[in-house]
């Protein structure tokens, strides 16, 4: 009996490891695909800010969003993200500031400053889109974040394509694996809880 329990436990462990490897591969591969296409807007997912400046991660997302705008993929940029703990500037306002400094007209920029999580980023962005009659979007974030973000957008039922930042701050294998482990956790958390 004890041997049978050990065998079952081993099989469960191996199944769990295999499942995690499969999902990790799906997340990794999805992040290598740029699906950018003609859309109504570009949603730049928020990330941390440092005072009035974007964190290195957020700076790369802003840069890529501006690049897509400049290339004519969409006429509107939507920056997402509220106020982090102790911050005087919202992520969205810092994104807007960076875009205007790069020459993007204020009229072509929309913001939402209420969200604190990826799901809230997308939910609030969807509300902004609806308010302004926008139906399709390109979502910009880091490559390993894209699968979960796209899954959330699909669940919110809006037409979204993904476009990962080609200049992600997560470049070394060590930082990529760290980000992947984090995403693996949050992917399953969202899958199970819907949050």
Image (tube, rainbow, N blue to C red):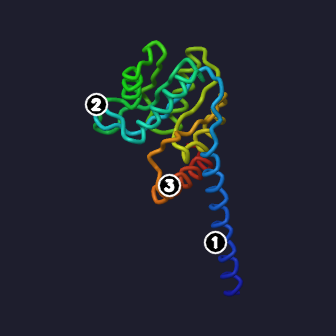
Secondary structure, mark 2, is loop
Q: Nearer the viewer, mark 1 or mark 3?
A: 3
Instruction: Kindly report the distance in space between the C-alpha atoms of the residues bearing marks 1 and 3.
Output: 24 Å
Q: Are marks 2 and 1 in contact (CB under 8 Å)?
A: no
Residue at coordinates 66% horizontally, 82% vertically from top-left?
Answer: 6
Q: Residue 131: where, in percent of width, then height?
A: 56, 16
Q: What residue sits right under mark 1 in the picture?
A: 13
Residue at coordinates 45% horizontally, 25% vertically from top-left?
Answer: 112
Instruction: Tell me the number on the disc at residue 80.
Output: none
Q: What residue sits right under mark 2 in the picture?
A: 88
Q: Are marks 1 and 3 in contact (CB under 8 Å)?
A: no
Residue at coordinates 38% horizontally, 41% vertically from top-left?
Answer: 56
Q: Quadrant of residue 162?
A: top right
Secondary structure, mark 3, is helix
Q: Quadrant of the C terminus?
A: top right
| Earlier-in-chain disc, 2 versus 1 | 1
Q: Residue 3: where, in percent of width, then height?
A: 69, 87
| Earlier-in-chain disc, 3 versus 2 | 2
Q: Residue 18: where, in percent of width, then height?
A: 67, 65
Please give left or right for residue 169 compared with residue 134 in the image: left
Please give left or right for residue 34 compared with residue 45 in the image: right
Q: Relative to the observer, which residue lies in front, 52 or 62?
A: 62
Q: What residue sits right under mark 3 in the picture?
A: 176
Residue at coordinates 36% horizontally, 33% vertically from top-left?
Answer: 83
Instruction: Kindly report the distance in space between the C-alpha atoms of the residues bearing marks 3 and 2.
Output: 30 Å
Above/below status of 66 relative to 184: above
Instruction: Kindly report the distance in space between the C-alpha atoms of the residues bearing marks 2 and 1.
Output: 46 Å
Q: Relative to the observer, which residue lies in front, 25 or 63?
A: 63
Q: Quadrant of the N terminus?
A: bottom right
Mark 3 packing: few (<14 Cα in 10 Å), some, or many (20+)?
A: some
């Amino acid at each position: 009996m004890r041997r049978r329990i050990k065998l079952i436990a081993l099989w469960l462990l191996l199944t769990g490891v295999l499942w995690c490897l499969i999902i990790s591969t799906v997340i990794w591969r999805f992040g290598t695909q740029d699906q950018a296409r003609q859309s109504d807007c570009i949603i730049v997912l928020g990330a941390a800010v440092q005072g009035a400046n974007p964190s290195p991660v957020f700076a790369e997302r802003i840069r890529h969003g501006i690049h897509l705008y400049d290339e004519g993929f969409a006429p509107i940029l939507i920056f997402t993200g509220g106020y982090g703990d102790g911050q005087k500037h919202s992520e969205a306002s810092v994104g807007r500031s960076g875009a205007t400094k790069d020459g993007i007209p204020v009229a072509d920029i929309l913001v939402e400053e209420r969200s604190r999580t990826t799901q809230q980023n997308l939910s609030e962005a969807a509300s902004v889109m609806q308010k302004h009659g926008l139906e399709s979007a390109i979502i910009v974030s880091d490559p390993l974040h894209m699968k979960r973000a796209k899954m959330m957008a699909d669940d919110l039922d809006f037409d979204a394509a993904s476009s990962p930042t080609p200049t992600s701050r997560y470049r070394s294998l060590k930082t990529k694996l760290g980000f992947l482990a984090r995403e693996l956790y949050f992917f399953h958390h969202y899958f199970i809880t819907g949050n």
